[in-house]
Amino acid sequence: MPKQKKFSGYQSVKGMHDILPSEQIWWDKLRKETREVAENYNFLRIETPILENTELFVRATGETTDIVEKQMFSFTTKGGDHLTLRPEGTPGVVRAYIQHGLSHLTQPLKVYYDGPLFRYEQPQAGRLRQFNQAGFEIIGGEDPIYDAQIILTIFRLLESLKIKDLVIQVNTIGCKTCRPAYRKKLIEYYKSRQKDLCKDCVRRMVVNPLRLLDCKNPACAEIRKEAPGILDDLCNNCHKHFKGFLEYIEELNLPYELNPQLVRGLDYYSRTVFEIFTKMISPEGKAFDSALAGGGRFDYLVELMGGRSTPAVGGALGMERVIEAAKALKANISAKPKSRVFLINIGDLAKKKSLSLIEEFVKAGVRISESLGKDSLSAQLRAADKEGVELALILGQKEAFKESVIIRDMKSGVQETVLTKKAVAEVKKRLK
Ligand code: HAM
């Protein structure tokens, strides 16, 4: 048995948080906007399991990525299967695409998803071990117009939450034809600075040189400043593709910046890569750029996973980061409409009848608040007051016997007794 850490009480697991009722207004809003924006741009919803075979991520996300090397929550089942809690959504979507022969549908296939992901990272502001993404993938389209459409979709979604100061960083990392020459150039440059590199980067030079550009170590970031960019080494096709993509982005007037050192941390990308940032202030009062979304082209992934050669492009936004950014801007989002009516019941018979009375209102589309477990009139009136409802329905012993109910106007205190079968109509009349 592995050594157990000391039991630390019933706390949520490190880096994993509850989303409490008070937060749900933000989550509802983001999920609703995700669905709406996705539908506006003709994306179909897809849901894949949270668990996948470990091999899927090793192959798709890439053996030498931080995600696969350090961040996967993996385990072996009692039956001996090696499974992993998905650290990102794209491999599962591509697996589903191949497994269910979705290439037979009209191409390109445009799908979107949202849900939880798991990465064993050092938790800090904006970095969790369980977090959520909303993702969009266009599979089966090579045209750079699709790259622009992915970015536009994510951008519109961020805008719908009123997030400002958005900057889209874009780059291309070439294809199988032009990348090898660039990789060589990069290795040569970094070899000349090897003694100042961090341990990870020395290893990256051998296993995944492009990732040298992605190192967060301050000394390596300094060296990166003079590293060669790929733009000069692009083959004709990649050059044309990137130029076409930029033209679409320009046409849309999207705020973009060219970042020739943007490479992204996942192995499957080719050609276009992008990240979307906004400005945030840390709890210590420091300004920083928060990466809200990222993505790019993955033209080789479907084939790598056993399908036919199929170009594709996609991107995902981090839902927690987006909600944090929206909250920081105090974006004004409207809460779910409150109920305007409160049911008060007094006595056993009234309590018995109260659930079916609520049903009548639910069926008629009128939401009713209640405090069914409380028996005293004053406690229930207090609860009704707290809710700020306009009307209270009072169902006492006498009313329950007589199949009637009292309607009380909470503001004026005026009360009227009506027959239960007329209650819905009477309430609707008063709420107009
Ligand atoms: P990614 O850049 O790893 O890309 O993640 C996308 C977004 O998820 C990030 O920009 C960030 O907002 C959020 N995120 C990532 N890690 C964490 C974390 N530990 N805590 C909180 N938020 C996080 C992908 O996952 C690709 N699958 C995107 C894609 C789709 N590429 C093509 N299609």
Image (cartoon, rainbow, N blue to C red):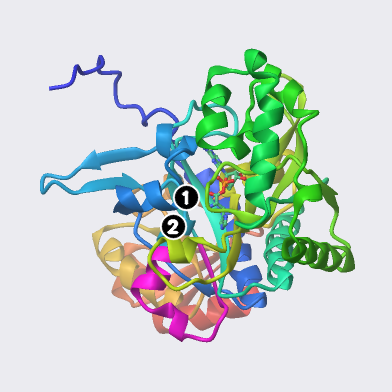
Relative to 178, is 149 above or below? below
**Does mark 2 have its CB less than 8 Å from ligand 1?**
no
Tell me the element at label 1: loop
Q: Residue at x 26, y 65 (%)?
A: 352
Tell me the element at label 2: helix
Indicate the quadrant containing the N terminus: top left, top right, bottom left or bottom right. top left
Residue identified by numbered label 2 = 91
Comparing 418 with 305, the one in front is 305
Q: Residue at x 30, y 40 (%)?
A: 74
Residue identified by numbered label 1 = 88
Snapshot quadrant of residue 101: bottom left
- What amino acid type should be assigned to the residue bearing mark 1? Glu
From the top left corner, tell me how far across and down residue 354 is, in percent.
Answer: 33, 66
Relative to 53, is 192 above or below? above
Query: Alpha-carbon distance for marks 2 and 1?
Result: 7 Å
Relative to 104, is 357 above or below? above
Indicate the quadrant containing the C terminus: top left, top right, bottom left or bottom right. bottom right
> Left of 173 or right of it: where is 355?
left
> Left of 94 or right of it: where is 312?
right
**Does mark 1 have its CB less than 8 Å from ligand 1?**
yes
Crowding at dot 2, Cα within 10 Å, few <14 / some 14-19 / many 20+, comes out as many
From the top left corner, tell me how far across and down residue 124 is, in percent.
Answer: 55, 26
The answer to whether residue 167 is seen in the rendering is no
Q: Which mark is residue 225?
A: none
Comparing 231 with 149, the one in front is 231
Q: Residue at x 58, y 25 (%)?
A: 201
Q: Residue at x 45, y 35 (%)?
A: 129
Which residues lie in the magenta part? 94-113
